[in-house]
Image (spheres, rainbow, N blue to C red):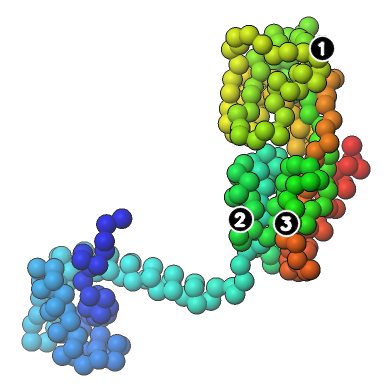
């Protein structure tokens, strides 16, 4: 945005103009603003000189807006009303900050957001700010109260961590895509399909090469696969029938239960990693942060009990 100050007339003259235009009277505008009639007249004259045109026609007993003045009145009145409303909102703003919850894109999209309405319904007075990012520094930045992180027990030495859910990884695709490959039964058969690869910078996140290697299969040669750097978008591609993706238990349970996704083969891989609740290593959380942590743990217990 270009600098505004050189383009703007003095604020006092705009306030005087708005009152005079609304009342069509310099005298009544002066009474409203607790100024003299001469001061109002002087400020409007300065405004007209600043703009280079007349805003009022003056007679002995009355003033009227010119055509330019009438158009300007609409803009000035709207702008001043917006400023007054914004200032009023700030004056009456709540004295506390929202509870900031951070998670990677997949956890936020597939686990947190579908469940968050239940927390908000139970705690309507808590404002929530969700920070979804695959950048670890974003998820543990200053101002983040709680993070739901993927990793192992040795991670985050400067934080308190509570184990939530384990990791199990398996192929998923749409029912329509599976119908095109009725012979798809074993992990080796996946080499004849289009694999949807999550392109990321995290060495510890499971990819197709490592998953297939765990099944004794090498991913080699030139392939016509699809690379996507956003996991929720990759899952949308799988739902749309564009190939086979790696799916995570707990994250994709709802999509599997709804039938939008299916497991084309039974093979899966369990790792020693999982999902953790990460909080500052302090003696005590805020009451709202503690309520959220307790809720997350209950949701995870319910998830495990329903399986």
The residue at the point 81 percent across, 45 percent down is: 153
Tell me residue 52's x, y (percent).
9, 68
- Distance from label 2 to label 3 (Cα)? 13 Å
Q: Is 144 left, or right, of 27 in this rendering?
A: right
Instruction: Please report whichever mark, 2 or 1, sits nearer to the chain's N-terminal start.
Output: 2
- Distance from label 2 to label 1 (Cα)? 43 Å
Mark 1 burial class by Cα count in 10 Å: few <14, some 14-19, many 20+: few
Label 2 with label 3: CB-CB less than 8 Å? no
Instruction: Tell me the tag on residue 141.
Output: 2
Instruction: Please report whichever mark, 2 or 3, sits nearer to the chain's N-terminal start.
Output: 2
Image quadrant in which you'd find residue 38: bottom left
Label 2 with label 1: CB-CB less than 8 Å? no
Instruction: Tell me the tag on residue 186.
Output: 1
Q: Is 157 left, or right, of 17 in this rendering?
A: right
Dot 3 corresponds to which residue? 158
Tell me if residue 124 comes above or below residue 180 in the rendering: below
Instruction: Please report whichever mark, 3 or 1, sits nearer to the chain's N-terminal start.
Output: 3
The residue at the point 29 percent across, 92 percent down is: 34
Residue 226 in sight here:
yes
């Amino acid at each position: 945005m270009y600098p505004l100050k050189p383009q703007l007339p003095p604020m006092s003259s705009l306030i005087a103009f708005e009152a005079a235009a609304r009342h069509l009277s310099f005298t009544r505008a002066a009474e409203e603003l607790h100024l003299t009639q001469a001061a109002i007249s002087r400020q409007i004259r300065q405004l007209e000189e600043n703009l280079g045109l007349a805003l009022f026609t003056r007679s002995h007993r009355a003033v009227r807006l010119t055509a330019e003045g009438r158009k300007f009145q609409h803009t000035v009145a709207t702008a001043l009303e917006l400023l007054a409303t914004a200032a009023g909102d700030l004056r009456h703003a709540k004295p506390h900050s929202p509870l900031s919850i951070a998670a990677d894109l997949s956890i936020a999209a597939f686990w947190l957001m579908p469940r968050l309405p239940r927390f908000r319904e139970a705690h309507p007075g808590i404002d929530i700010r969700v920070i979804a990012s695959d950048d670890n520094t974003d998820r543990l930045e200053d101002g983040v109260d709680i993070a739901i992180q993927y990793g192992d027990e040795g991670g985050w030495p400067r934080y308190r961590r509570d184990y939530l859910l384990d990791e199990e990884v398996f192929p998923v695709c749409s029912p329509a895509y599976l119908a095109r490959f009725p012979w798809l039964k074993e992990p080796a058969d996946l080499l004849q399909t289009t694999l949807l690869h999550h392109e990321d910078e995290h060495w510890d996140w499971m990819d197709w090469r490592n998953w297939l290697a765990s099944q004794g299969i090498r991913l080699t040669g030139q392939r016509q696969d699809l690379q996507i750097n956003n996991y929720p978008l990759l899952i949308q591609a799988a739902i749309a029938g564009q190939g086979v993706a790696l799916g995570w238990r707990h994250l994709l349970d709802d999509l599997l239960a709804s039938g939008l996704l299916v497991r084309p083969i039974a093979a899966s891989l369990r790792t020693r990693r999982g999902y953790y609740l990460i909080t500052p290593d302090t003696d005590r959380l805020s009451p709202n942060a503690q309520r959220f942590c307790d809720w997350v743990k209950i949701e995870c217990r319910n998830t495990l009990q329903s399986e």
